[in-house]
Each structure stands twice: as structure tokens, then as C-alpha cells.
Image (spheres, rainbow, N blue to C red):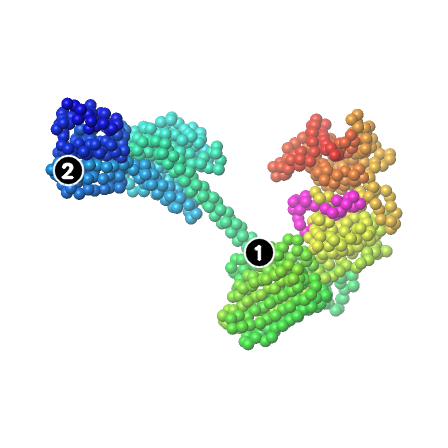
Amino acid sequence: MTRPSTDLFLGGGDTGRLMARLDWADTPLGPVGGWPQSLRAAVRMVLSSRYPMLLLWGESYSQLYNDAYSALIGDKHPAALGDDVRVTLAEGWPVLAPLIEEAMATGVASWVPALQLLLERAGYREEAYFSVSHAPARDDDGRTVGVLTVCSEVTQQVIGERRLRLLRDLSVLGDGRTVDVDATAARLIDVIDGHPLDVPFAAIYLRDGTALRRVACTGGDHRHVRALPDAVELTDPGPPSYTWGLPDAAELTDPGPPSYTWGLPDAAEGRATPVTDVADRLPLPAGPWNDPVRTALALPLPSADEDQPLGVLLAGVSPSRGLDEAYHSFHQLLAQQISVALRNAREYEEERRRVEAMAELDRVKTDFFANVSHEFRTPLTLILGPLTDALTDATAPLAAVQRERVETGWRNATRLLTLVNSLLTFSSLEAGRARSDARMVDLAALTAELAGVFRAAVERAGLTLEVSCPPLPRPVAVDPVNWERIVTNLLSNALKYTFIGRIRVTLDTDDEEVRLTVADTGIGIAERDLPKLFERFHRVRGARSRSHEGTGIGLALVHELARLEGGDVRVTSQVGVGSRFTVTLPWSAAYRTAITGPAVDGRGDAARAAVEEAIGWLTEPDDAPTEPDPTSGAATDELAGARILLADDNADMRAYLTRLLTGQGWRVRAVTDGRQALDEIHRHLPDLVLTDVMMPVLDGFDLVRRLRADPTTRALPVLVLSARAGGEASVEGLSLGADDYVVKPFAAAELIARIRASIRRARDRTPAVAVGGDPPTVAAAAPPAGTAPVGPATPSPTVDPVRDAVVIEPAAAEPDGLGDLLDVGWTFPSAPTSAAAMRRDVRGALVELDVDPDVLEDLLLAASEAMNNAVEHAQRPSRPEVRVRVQVGGGLIRISVRDFGTWRDRRPAMDRGRGALLMNAYGDVRLVSTAEGTTVTIERRLA
């Protein structure tokens, strides 16, 4: 008789078997045998479905459901079978009742895509979401006696989309590009504050030295903000009242008892830390059902340094959601998003500070230029005034020699005044203090006059100057001084970079604007350099020019002055074809209100000064060397008749140095660039090369590099003369193999002394050559006969820092064959100038052994550092000298540098931090320090 009842639940899975064993007689539905056919049919449909379905039947809302639905109600199953749904889902009934009662009353089905329900299916009051449809269930007579519920859980989908919205909002609002770090943190917290269901509370802590500083936390105007104290010192736990608030700062060095730290120290070390007693510290209702927050997470904020996070995010966990893997992943993404925003803000803030610092530095520099330029004008006035008086004084005319000297001084003082005026104008433009004193002028006549000033210089350069400035239909309001600077700079630039062809100046107009065009057939400008051409101090590297002199602000000044006059400047160019600069001046700017009154004095002065400078570029030295004055120099001077090759692109500097050197009884051949110097050296090898650094075609450093790479000129003394001051410039020159480096301005006596010392050292290393005879050739250095053997030497009572080194005789060859090919030594004074002398002597000793040039240069650099260390480190030396020994043999080169003082560390200001690095990079280095001194040995294999 039970068979029909059992058959009803067949195929219903685990829930069907439970329903088959249930005593339905004890339920409001009664025995299964008495169930109407409509109920039986509905039960079969529910059990056969794999979709979650719930059937509520009768006034007691008795529950019948399938396996899929049992998984949704968790631990309420199987007690819910046959029971009243109002009891089973009591916590969610206020939400479900209206929907169920409506279906019962109206017989109309309903559907809710994401119904929020409170469930207690996992031991806590859970926030859950379901897609639910309620349809009426009818009995055999067609009356609505129940509800068929079809549902699916969409909790993960709803909550996941909500969390993604939070992360998206953080990425949009927390970009950190417009505010500082603290303000960015506050904005991030404001975004988090709008998502309390996922993050009930949050606080951001950032590193501040050895502490974490709280920069922002949720709360705002909400009621729970009163529960968060402003600060808690973790180094001092304080009274128990501190235990219920968020700390304002956490000391990492002494976090105090663990119960007060909120996991911050552990998180600051990179470990995510759960905090499980939040309810005891921060009574904060949260979640959809206002349950107290019980758990929080202290999460490290990642930084570029994996071992030191940027800070810590303290985030509350919703009491209505379990802290599962998905929730953990969300918190990690939250911390990463906040970290990215804060790091962006910090980088932006640092960049903004750098920009502000650069702007302030630029302002200070501009003010400095202006102040210095003003200060220069007074001494320049006192220089130019007397010089002009001396040149124009008919009552006391100058002798020819004195007039030449005074004219040189006047020309260069005038050039200096032009540079000062340019700097002053540019600083005024940069500071926004420049103005245009516009006057109504005949712009065509003014332009033609200024261009005509350059005609002699252009024709002297072998070029053609074409000027086409027809009268304009009306006068133009423009500042004549500014226009003169514009035309002068463009013409000077064209002359500097044009070697063949012509320079054309045109002025034309249309209904819109006036156009000044300066076109040339010069070297042209590469397309990549055009965008930066009008930037201040920008110079095209490697460009061929008549001179490398200049400030690099000429074209920038043209650009700024054109804009000051209401116009603009543009350029088109093609390498090897030429360049075209066009200054445009709209008629709207040309109709400005012009000032009246007398014109400013000095019209054309800037153009004439530029022409004077340009003529200096065009002055070619004589092909023949300048012979010394027979009346000059000491008759017994062993250096009389020495040949000096002078390379400098400044005509006045060449003339001055030529007079200075021929006055010593030396023969001087002057050239204008490094290429001419190389050609002259190959024709006639001089005793010494004196070269400038900044020259066209081939500069001084490239000249030194090529001379040292050529075996025939490797030992040729080279003295570099440059206006580039500073340690880096001198180190660069000396490291390339220059024998000495002299910075302009220099004292004539010092330059003469350095040249004499260089020539003497070179002659000591080479066989004697009769003065005026055949050019000398470089020979291997050999110790002179009769010198003292290696060993302790009695120090001289005084040490001359620039005297030649004393050559000491080599000791016996070492057992391993080291010294078989060469063994020579020198004693140098313990002075900074000795490094240059040492390099010359070592180079001369090794030059004939066919040592690889790269190996030789490496060893010279390492030996120079060892010599500098010996001079700088030796404290209270027993002998004020440094001994250097070079040994070659057995496939090795060994250079030993010994001082006679106790070791001392250099002051930080002296320590460049590169000596040991250089020495170890270029050879095997050993250091032995004793009470008698320190010996540094550098070894390198020949192969």
C-alpha cells in the first residue's frame, strides 16, 4: 500500500529519498496518499529539475524542494522539508512575504533579478542575492493554494560587480595627478567610504621614517567617526581606553603589546595580517543588517622596494560576508589600487617640486644674469672709455706695437659688452620684464642699412650678399633696437655657417603681414634639430662652422624678440642646401601705438660689433711660421728656436699668443682648427702643440685623441688651452693624453713656464736635436747614464712642485723575467702637478715597446689615480716625494707607485669615489702599506 507514495519521490536524488522517508502525516500536508493530483504533479516536476525550485503548499506554506535548492539554504536542510517557510526563512521573510502573498492573492507570477536576502545558513547573518520567480500553484479545482518558486543564487555576481565598481572608482578618482599624497589618500578614502557593504571602515598609513603615519581614514560625517580617536602612541599602550580606536601613528621600532598594534608592524614588513577582535576595539555596525564588524585586515601597500612597503591599508571586513578566497583577493586588489594611486601622487608631487625648484632656480639664474650684467657695465665703461681715448688721442699718439695691443683690448671689451647686453636682454625676456619701445620707422630702409653693415665681412668670406628691401606701403611700429638684434643675429648666424654661395636678405609684405627672410646656401640643419633650434643654449653638435665661439642664445633671442614685437619666426632647412629664416610681423602688431621723442643713441652698434667679431673668424693666419724677434729671448736659452704649433679659431687670441711666444725666441705656426693642425704636424713635427678645445672642423680633444693614436706623434707634448674650467674638463683632456691643461684667463708667465717644462721633459726623453735642424722624432725613453741607483735617497731641503722628475736607475731584473724588456723609475715631488709629469714619462718609456694603445691609456689612467692617491693620502711624509717604477717583461707590465707617508683617509669633499674603481678596472692592483709608506702595484698583461 506504500508503493504509490514511494514512487512519487523516485528520481529525486538525496532530497527525494529524504522526502520518501519523512512521515508526512505529522505535517500540515498529511499522508502522501491523500495528496491531490495537482500537488503530486508539482512535486514530480520540482524533484526532476536540476534548477533550484521550492514548492510552498497550503496555508502553512509547507516546503517541498529539490537537491539544487537544498544547497542554497545550507544547514537549514533537511529540517526545512515539510516545515513552514516563515519559520525556516524567518530572517528573510519580511522581504519574501510581499512577493509570495501577491502571487497567492493575484495569481500573477513575479520575477526579481537580484533579490537581497538575509540568510543564516553558515553560522552568521549572511548577505545573499537571488534571482527569484514566484508563480501561483493551483489545486485540482484551479484554486491558488501555493507558490512555485524558481530561484538561482547570484550573490557572487552582484558582489563581484559591486567590488569592481569600487576598484574602478579608485582608479579614476585616485590618479594622483592633481593633488599631493595626503590629498590623494583622502580622496581614495572618500571613494571607499561610499562602499560600506564591502569595506565597513578603512585607514591608510604611510611610512614616515621609522613610523607609520595615518594620512586618511573613513568616517566623514557618519556617526561612527566619533569612535575613532585622533591618535594612539603604540610605543606607550596607555590606558585601556585606547583599545577601541584606530591608531594615528605606529612606531615600527617598538610596536608595544600585540593587542594594540592592529597588525600594522607585521603589515609594514610585507605580511598581510588579520585582526580578529575589532568588535572589542571599534563598536561599528556595518553590513546590510548593521551587525558589528568583527574582523579587519592590515595589508601592505606594495612599493618599488619589495622589502619595504609604501605603507599599510587597514580595512574592515563585512560582518555579512565570509572572508573567503574571493574576499581576500578583493582586498589585495584594493591595496594594490591604492598603492598605485599613492605612488603616482608621490611621483607627481616630486615632479612638481622639481619643476618648482627648477623654475625657482631659473628665476634666480635670470636675476643673477641681470644683476651681473648690470655690474659688468660699470667696469666695461671704465675699460672702453680709456681705451677709446687712447686710440683717438691725437696729441699723444700710440706707438704701433702699443696701438695693436690697445686695439685688441678694445675689440674684445666691445665683444664682451655685446655679450653682456645679450644676456641682459635675454634675462629681461625670461623674467617678463622686457618691453618694446615701438617707434614708427621705415622698416625697409632700416633693414637695408643693417644688412649693409655686413657687406664687407660677407664679401671678405668670398660670399655674395643680396639685399632686396623695397619700400613698404606704410611705416611700421617696431622697436628699432629689437629689430637690429633680430637682423644682426640672423645675418651673423648665416655668415658663420655658410662657406660658399650667397646670403640673401629680403623684406616683403602682403595684406596680412610683413616678412623678413634671411636665406643662405650654408651647411643646413638636420630635421631632428629643427624643433630645438630656438631653445636657449641649444647648439647643433658636430656642425661645421667658422668658429665655435658664442653663447648659444642668438636664435633664442631672435625668437623671443620677434614674439615681443607681436610676430614670430620660423625656419626651413635642408642639409647641404641651406637654411631660410623668416620673421613675420602682422600688420595688426605694426599698427601699435608708437612712442615719440628722440631716437635711442647707438643705432647700428650691435651690427658693427657682430661684424667685428665675424671678421675675426675670417682672419686666416700666415702660411709661414712667425719667426722670433732677433732681439728677444736669452741668447743662452737652450729652448731658443723651439717650434710651437698654435691651434685656435679666435684671431685675437692667435695674435696675442704668437706675440707672447715669439717673444721667448720660439718659432710659432698658427692654424685655425684641429684639422689644419694635423696637416701641419704631418708636414713639420713641432716641439709642442698648444691647442684650444672649442674649434670648428676638429676640436682640441679630438686632436689630442688622434695624436695619441698615431705612433709617430704619441709622445709629442700637447698643452690644452681652454675656457672650459672645472675638474671634469681637465680630467677629460688629461685622460685623453694631454700633457697639461691651462684654463683661460691665464697668466702669461705661468703659460710660458708650463710650455718650457713640457718641452724640457720631452727633450729629456728623446735624443738631442740641434735647434733649427731636422724635426725630432720620438724615441724610447732610456735612463741617462750616471744616475743614482734605486734605493733610499736623501730628500732635498726644498721641493719645487714643477721641476722635472729625477730618473732613477733600474734595479736588477726579477726572477720571473719581469724587467727584461724595460725597468726604469723616476722620483717626483709630492705635488698635484706631478701626475701630468708622470704620465708623460711613463708614456715616453712605453711608446717604443709597441704596447697596445688601449692598454697604454688604461695603465696611464690607473697610474694617475695611484699618483693622486699618493699625494692626497700621504700624511707627514718622511720624504716629500713619490717614486714610480715601470717594469716590462715576461708578458707583463707592472707600474709601482710608492709614497713615504702614513695612510690617511681623504675628506669627503676630496673623495671623488672613482680612484679604486678606475685602478681595478684597468689592471690587477695590490696595495701594501707600512709605517714607512704605501706602495700601489698595477699589473696588466701585454697580450
For this view, does 666 lie left or right of residue 831? right
| For residue 340, above or below residue 588 | above
Front one among 590 and 300: 300
Above or below residue 550? Residue 594 is below
**Of 375 and 899, the residue lying toward us:** 899
SS assignment at label 1: helix
Magenta part of the protein: which range? 705-733
The residue at 23%/37% (across/down) is 150
**Mark 1 or 2 closer to N-term?**
2
Question: Where on the picture, by quarter, is residue 727?
Answer: top right
Q: Name the side, left or right, on which 291 lies relative to 429.
A: left
In the rendered structure, which amino acid carries the disc numbered 1? Lys
Residue hosting label 2: 138
Q: In terms of secondary structure, where does tag 2 sit?
A: strand
Q: In the rendered view of the protein, which quadrant contains the C terminus?
A: top right
Q: CA distance from mark 1 to mark 2?
A: 86 Å
Whether residue 724 is in magenta: the answer is: yes
Q: Is residue 629 above or below residue 310?
A: below
Q: Position of residue 223 (x, y in %)?
A: 27, 39
Name the residue that disc number 1 marks: 532
Q: Residue at x 83, y 56 (%)?
A: 627
Q: Could you tell me if residue 424 is visible in this image?
A: no
